[in-house]
Image: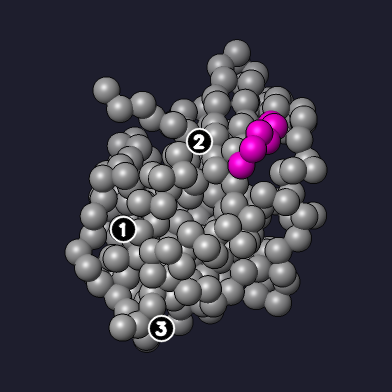
Amino acid sequence: MRTEPNAYSHRWFDFFHVNIREARTMQEAAFVCRCAPLPGFREIADVCCGMGRHARALSKHGYSVIGLDRDADAIAKARALAGGPTYVNADVRDYRPDPGMFDVAIIMSQSFGYFDATTNREVLGRLADGVRQGGRVILDLWSAEFFMIHQGRCEFKTPGGVVRETKYARGDRLFVHLDYPDGGEDNFEWQLFTPARMISMAESVGLSQLLACTAFDETTPPSPMNPRVQFVFERCRD
């Protein structure tokens, strides 16, 4: 049976996903809208969409959105919330969209980099193939520079209690362990990418860089002081 790295438990959804502020979702969706504006970019694949918060927001802006996630419960909740998108329950490692099927593919909320380096590149390559020439791929990732200097233990006070986090980086991998108030736990792992490494990988699958920034602000370059970095790539034209 295939192992499931970064399988998000119901606890994670309860503590970290359900209560995400609407303002944050609107900010992130607005970034996508600016980087892939209508009417030239209408068909969007929201990959690793979770419960569909970005998919719904983009649908409200007028995009045609397909949301993809391997978590059947998350997809069921996304469908129950409706809001316009179509949802597909599938593993991103198996998903093979038709060539040029989308104008844009997005992977938000640090949901890229779950696997080994070879598999991560294969996933990006298939998404690049699924975007038309001149289409765009938008990634929202953890910042390698930030986590090289921000490791150790911390606590999150949530409405459901205190969640204790331990994170460390080894090589180009970030490892995170979460202890929940009821004794449950989660473990996560990502491949970390410096801007140079991410751009190199993207170029190897036929994408060219348009933008690297942080805080969903096109004018703010990636910084070791911010844990997230956003990349916008364009599918190379023949």
Q: Quadrant of residue 137?
A: bottom left
- N-term mark: 1 or 3: 3
Q: Which mark is residue 38?
A: 3
Which residue lies most toward the top here? 183
In the image: residue 36, left or right of residue 20: left
Does residue 169 belong to the magenta stretch? yes
* SS at circle 2: helix
Highlighted range, magenta: 167-172
Residue nearest the observer in this picture, 185 or 55: 185
Distance between mark 1 and mark 3 Cα atoms? 24 Å
* Quarter that holds the N terminus: top left
Residue nearest the observer in this picture, 18 or 146: 146
Residue linked to disc 1: 126
Residue linked to disc 2: 13
* SS at circle 1: helix
Amino acid tagged 2: Phe
Residue nearest the observer in this picture, 46 or 115: 115
